[in-house]
Structures are given as C-alpha cells and as structure tokens.
Image (cartoon, helix red, strand yellow):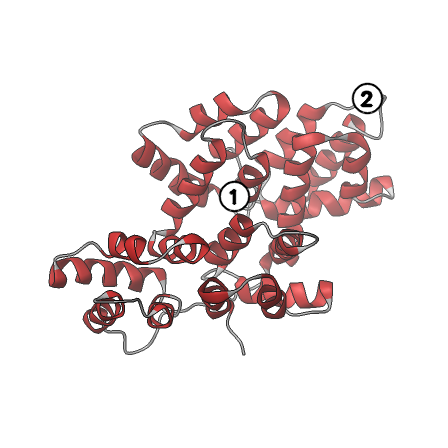
Amino acid sequence: MSWYYTPVPTVVPVEGFDASADANALRGAMKGFGTDEQAIIDVLCTRSNAQRQQINEQYSSELGRDLIEDLKSELGGKFEDVIVGLMMPPEKYLCKQLHKAMDGLGTDEDTLIEILAPQTNEEVKKIVDCYEEMYSRPLAEHLCSETDGSFRRLLTMIIVGARDPQGTVDADLAVEQAKQLYDAGEGKLGTDEEVFYKILAHASFDQLEIVFEEYKKLSGQTIEQAMKSELSGELYDALSAIVECVQMAPHFFAKRLHKAMDGAGTDDAKLIRIIVSRSEIDLQNIKDEFEQMYNKTLLSAVRNECSGDYKRALCALIGGA
C-alpha cells in the first residue's frame, strides 16, 4: 500500500557527537563582537533534535547560560525563526505553531489542517498533552472557540483520537464505507457532510486507502473528484488533506512547499514550518516528490526564493549540494 512508503529524513543524528564541544562552539560563535552565523548553522542544522536538546542542557550546565535566549539575542528575522524552531522538541514546535494559528484576531485554518491532518492517534495524543502543558488550556477547547460547523467537528474528532489504530483493516467494511460515502454525496441531492468527516476521521489510514479504491470501483470517480463537487471551504480543504496524506504524505507536503514559493512573495512561515518539522521524518521523500512534480529540485527553489543566513539554514536542512 502506498501509505507504507519508507520515510527518509534529511537530518539524522551525527556520529561522534560531543554535546560539550558543540555547546562551546556555539558560545564561541556568539561571544564578543559580531556573530558567526555559519558556525551556528554547521552545528544546529546537522544534529538531530535529541542531540540539540543535549547541547541545550550542556550549554546551561557548563556555561551557566540559556542557549535559546542567547540565540534570540544574537539572531533575527526568519533565520532566528528557523534556528529557534530547531531547538524546540518536535511536539512543542507544532503546539507553538497551532497556538500561533489561533491566537489573536482571525484563525489560520490552513495551518491547523496542515499540522493535524497527517497525524496518527499516537502523534495527536503527544500534541494534545503538550499543548495543555504549554498553554494551560486544552487544545480541543481552543480549537472549538476558533472554528465552527463541520470543520470544527472534524478537527475535534481528530484530536480526541477517534481514528482506529494503524494497521486496522476490514475489507468488507471498506466496501460498505465506500457505499456510505457515495450515498452521502454523489448518490443524493445535497451532501451529508457528517458521513464524510466521520469516516475520514475514524478509519485508519490503511483502511481509508481500501475505501478509496472501493469508491472508485463503485462510482467510476476518485474520492477527490467526488469531494470537489460535493464539499467546499475549510471542510473540503481538511478532508482533501486527509485523502492526500493517506495516499502519499510527501506529495501533500511537496505541493504545499511549492505553493509557499509560487507567485509573488513567499509564505516563509509555511516554508520554515514544513522544512523544520519534516526534516527528521520524510524530507528526503518530499524532496524526491517535489522534483518529480515540478521538474526542479526543492533546493534550487529555496535558493531562488530565500537569501542570506536564512537561505543557508534551510538549504543545510534540505541537504544535498
């Protein structure tokens, strides 16, 4: 099944790791007049997150200073966003992005979808626990206050861990679920949205892949084609994100990276979020998919869009000459 692609990261633990040497190298890069940004990139963009946490602890115990505060005082702009993002444990980083998407005036639904749609139950639980710890507020409650309607119900289902565990598959049930989706959309006047979000938020990704195959046999259309004509707005965006992640998560992220750099201006927040959060999961797969889809490398696209230390940091995470 396509969902079982083998995730290949671009950032892996460095061999011969020495947290003390790295901590001292970082202090040296920030001490005195001026900052050696390249030295910071060379250390932090080539270590795994677990190694960065060890460097952080070593920096504090050996030098009696706060590494993140030092980095914030020495760096600025988008380069700072990348480096400080790398220093956060993965679930804390995603929680911060979710909070940012809901904080203040208006809600960034697109970011909520991008972060929550690809997650398994286990990953969602980590995020939910971490969010409450960080913000003293349940994620579900914050989401409910910022969203409404079917979109709210779908996100709530995702974060309460309603999805069946990975590997849960029932071929007979898949035929029935495909029929339910057909009857709720193409097979009737109007659309019963509830059927769509209940099945797409409850079934395991493995099960959904079979459901989508059965749907095509039944309808002659792909589930994407059906949803496009039956749904709209944030609910459509969220459900189609789930469909894409079921079929091939790297494709989903490659498309979003391309969109972040396409046309006038760059969506730097999205670019940073995806590259930082996927670098230790499947950024190599995303790179391969990006090149296949757009006939250019992700590295060359980032080089054209970004500049300075910010560009160098992202390119170091992406890897490859």
Q: Earlier in the sequence, mark 2 or mark 1?
A: 1
Identify the element where label 1 is drawn: helix
Q: Nearer the viewer, residue 16 or 212?
A: 16
The x and y percentages for residue 127 are: 40, 40
Depth check, mark 2 against mark 1: the one in front is 1
- Is residue 221 toward the left or the right of residue 175 in the image? right
Residue 295 in view here:
yes
Occupied quadrant, residue 117: top right
Measured as percent of width and height from the top left, residue 268 is found at: 54, 52
Identify the residue shown where x is 31% and y is 60%: 50
Dots 2, 1 in contact, CB < 8 A: no
Q: CA distance from mark 2 to mark 1?
A: 30 Å
Numbered mark located on residue 86 in the image: none
Label 2 Cα crowd, 10 Å radius (few <14 / some 14-19 / many 20+): few
Residue flagged by tag 1: what amino acid is it? Ile
Question: At which x and y percent is residue 48?
Answer: 36, 64
Q: Could you say which quadrant of the image residue 203 lies in?
A: top right
Position of residue 171 measured from the top left corner of the image (x, y, whole percent): 68, 44
What amino acid is found at the position of numbered circle 2 in the picture?
Gly
Residue 7 seen in the current view: no
Please give the label number shown on residue 115: 1
Residue at the spot of label 2: 190
